[in-house]
Image: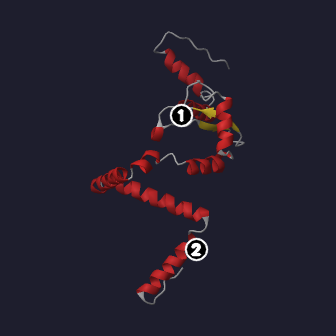
Amino acid sequence: MPRNKGTPEATKAADAEYMRKRLMDPEQRERARRASRESIARRRKSDPEFAESQRQAAAKWRAEHPEAARTAGCNRNQRELNLKKLYGLDLNAYEALLNSQGGVCAICGEPPRGEGRNQKHLHVDHDHASGKNRGLLCGGCNTAMHKLEKDPDWGIKALNYLARYIELTVKDGG
């Protein structure tokens, strides 16, 4: 959109209207948020003074808002939106799946770790080709499944690697 060549107030108003309309589109809004986060992350890496000021501002906010800080990062509404958007699940469906697995990882049987703000959730394992949800996994098992999907021989490679350090013989089944 060409900038208004009128007064500074008119230019500011036109820019604000343009941004309001542009950011009404959810995809545009998400792209703008992502670009902003990436820009701030790059600045933190390249400018130690900026990074320190960000840390101090965050510490000050946490001190002034202890209850909000305790629950920050585990916003139930945001979690529900992510589950719905990424996996087609609402919190009730996630909880039902978690309960059907006894509250533990479907592979290793470990429960989610952490408490309160640091509570970890089990990851929704899904087939990347079909998008179909398979179960809930801890972070380690989810990473391993991702590697196996990308390279089915990864498991054999990992076992052979371990075999070099422990007395274990693994034969390739194929």
Q: CA distance from mark 1 to mark 2?
A: 39 Å
Most extreme residue toward the bottom, as rendered? 6
Q: Earlier in the sequence, mark 1 or mark 2?
A: 2
Amino acid type at image mark 2: Lys
Of the 4 image quadrants, the one containing the C terminus is: top right
Classify mark 2: residues with Cα within 10 Å, few (<14), some (14-19) or many (20+). Answer: few
Check disc 1 and report its element: helix, strand or loop. Answer: helix
Q: Quadrant of residue 70?
A: top left
The x and y percentages for residue 68 are 44, 50
Q: How many marks?
A: 2
In the rendered view, how is the structure colored? secondary structure
Reading the image, the residue beneath label 1 is 139
Left or right: where 45 falls relative to 76: left
Residue 7 pos. (x, y %): 43, 89
Q: Is residue 156 left or right of residue 88?
A: left
Mark 2: secondary structure: helix
The three-letter amino acid code for the residue at tag 1 is: Gly
Residue ID for mark 2:
21
Residue 39 vs residue 152, the one in the foreground: 39
Seen from the viewer's position, the closer of residues 129 and 14 is 14
Note whether 107 is above or below 61 in the view shown: above
Residue 49, percent across and down?
27, 55
Q: Residue at x 61, y 48 (%)?
A: 80
